[in-house]
Amino acid sequence: MKVALLQGGRSLERGVSLRSGARVAEALLDLGHHVETMDLGPDLVSRLESTRPDIAFIALHGTEGEDGTIQALLELLGIPYTGPGVAACQRCIDKSLAKYILREHDLPTPDWVTYSEAAIRDFGAASSFPQAVEAVGMPLVAKPASQGSALGVKVVTRPEEIPDALITALSYDSRALLETWVSGRELAVSVLGDQVLPIVEAIPTDSNSYDFEARYEIGGADFVCPADLGGDKAGEVSRVALSAFNALGCSGFSRVDLILGETGPQVLEVNAIPGLTETSLLPQAAEAAGIDFNEMIEQILGLALE
Amino acid sequence: MASSPPPRRSQTRSRDLERYASLFAKRTRVMRSSAMRDMMAITARPEVISLAGGLPDTSTFPAGVFSREMDHIAKTSLAEALQYGPTEGLDSVREQISKVMAAEGAVVDPADVTPTTGGQQAIDLITKVLIDPGDVLICDAPTYPGAIPTFCSYEAEIVQIECDQDGMKIDVLEETLVSLAAEGRKPKFIYSIPTFQNPGGSTLSLERRRRLVEIARREEILVVEDNPYGLLRYEGEPLPTLLSLDGGDYVVYIGTFSKVLSAGLRIGWLVSPTPIREKIVLGKGAADLCTSTLTQEFAARYFAEGQWQEYIAELIAIYRNRRDAMIGAMSEYFPHGAFWTKPQGGLFIWATMPDVLNTEDLLAKALSQNVAFVPGSSAYVDGRGASSMRLNFSGVREDRIIEGIRRIGAVAREQLKLYETMTSTDEMRLPPPEGEA
């Protein structure tokens, strides 16, 4: 097959995307496909039109690649693509919208409030910080609404730290969430087609559990797969994750991040297009299920063409 | 017909990752990538105005000169130029290096010069031969961001001494030496860029230069003087190098052709006392056998031809204008409360925003406007520098500099305004002071 491999782009996760892309390219070549690698730029549409690929493999992370922009463009051009569709991408990239949808489906997710830059700047929203603290409690986590990585995430332990944390979060997106901080075990559940893959637990080697570096660097975190949870708990976590995947309308593959706290699993976010680098969690989970990287890539292509 | 080997490396599986993780030396724990480095991946895109590099403008180098020198090498010494050379470097280039140094008033014997693969290798080699894990070394605060990974990879304990516009505060250095001595510790060396410092833009004053050398001699501590920019002076009187003031007993000198000729040639050098030089040469042999013979030949010929000073004069004129354009734009566009250095030379301006702004966050916003800088925190090992940024003016045209600064100013003002909105609301909600109605 002729595969257009979309990678890079101008999101802050460009570097991760290039690493995902490099790995996917190898696999596609191994599988005997013809690969045309494309970085996002002004010539994207003309390149797609002149190449006429059978399928586009989207190895993009963050805004533009993961928010439905590219997916909508590919639909217009009539090119099938990997991963979730336009609407699912839009639901996942917007953590606030995703949480509303999860709540509508009675799925557990920590309490939160959302602030937009405009509300703070134009409507005096800062006066409502006390109500926000009451709603979500302390400590809380401030995070940008649409970053896939841990960029811009800050833990707030005192109300007076909120402006600082929001300035940070709002540097990465025009909206930010204040979310209840839930202590517990960090779990990632990847879904491939209709198969829930074994649960990965990330145990940060540093004490800061929101360390961006731990997510992408060899040795930055210990990953255990399958996570040692016991059958009942694992079953519950997997069920919640699959329900979240379905509630948001995902298809093909995605990764659900959860915290397993005292009250059970809580969904933090769903990554429509999770990382596919050497240290990424989806490939690890697939491998634990006996699916090697090449086979996983082949399955992802197959799912996109279904 | 023999089958060709597989063209690609095999896929890395998670158990391979575990295997590698258990193989890595402990010192690689500090060689971590970072969110920042990932964010910097965007600066490679053509639409981004990058004020983040440390780049000389190599587009100004005359193509005719390049072909003439290369042509001459091809005709007269091609076999040698394509061969390994001595680890100590070619005599011809060592001689030219001493000539270039003389232009800054430093008199050195070519025999004391060791050409290295860029100034960066000189930093690596001096750290390699002097630092055992846990040894203390002292450097400027802020310091050259590229030196930190080197120091860390040899597991040095880094102590940074605050700088002002006159460079490293020598009083603070003395206090630090006293408190280290109280713990029974003594730094192996003091690393400093005394002239047009990277990233601070400051220049160590003559008085402080004298005191630093005095301390080095009194306390018997080596000073590593890194001087990549000394010849790029846009105004003011040149100051003597630490090496000249000391005579070469306690000062090890690092130079480079990267900023006055080409960074791509990768030629730097060390001037050091003989016992250190001998160890450096052994270390260099282990690292790369020799610096590229071809580029050494090129540099030796180029500097022997005698037009290099004209080229530097040309660079000075270009960079001075760019520096002025940047400072002018900062005065116009940066928010109230921001301040910055006005370097008399070199490639960088160090700007500090009002302290509620964190420049790592600001970088994310700036990148969304297609402009990049280096956040100040990367010039410290201790979390300082969070409101500062390093801005490069040498590698970017004036119109782009002005536009880049305008965009950074705009996002900074936006963030400040948002912060003020949030905090002034807080104040409005505070209960009235006691005793008032």
Image: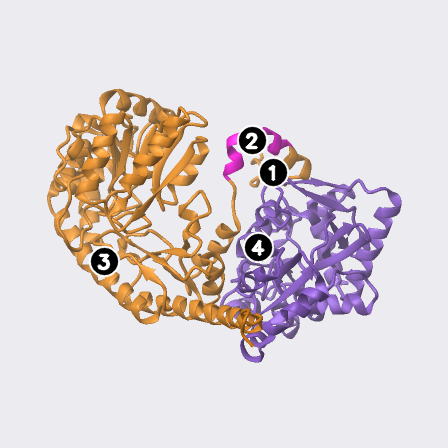
Q: Colour of chain B?
A: orange
For marks 4 and 1 on the same chain, the one whose residue lies earlier in the sequence = 4
Q: State the CA–CA distance, disc 4 to disc 1.
A: 20 Å
Viewer-closest of B197 and B113 = B197
Q: Secondary structure at mark 2?
A: loop
Q: Residue furthest bottom?
A: A123
Shown in purple, the chain is: A
Q: Secondary structure at mark 1?
A: loop
User: Which mark identifies residue A17?
Assistant: 4
Q: Main secondary structure of the magenta part?
A: helix
- The amino acid type found where label 4 is placed reads Ser
- Give the crowd class for mark 4: few <14, some 14-19, many >=20 residues within 10 Å: many
Q: State the CA–CA distance, disc 2 to disc 1.
A: 9 Å
Residue B271 visible in the displayed image: no
Instruction: Check disc 2 and report the residue beneath it.
Output: B24
Q: Which residues are magenta?
A: B19-31
Instruction: Check disc 1 and report the residue beneath it.
Output: A219
* The N terminus of chain A - image quarter: bottom right
Tell whether B332 sits left or right of B94.
right
* Whole-percent x, y for residue A305 in the image: 74, 62
- In which image quadrant can residue B325 be found? bottom left
Q: Are marks 3 and 2 in contact (CB under 8 Å)?
A: no
Tell whether B111 sits left or right of B326.
left
Q: State the CA–CA distance, disc 3 to disc 2.
A: 43 Å
Can you say whether A220 is above or below B291 in the image? Answer: below
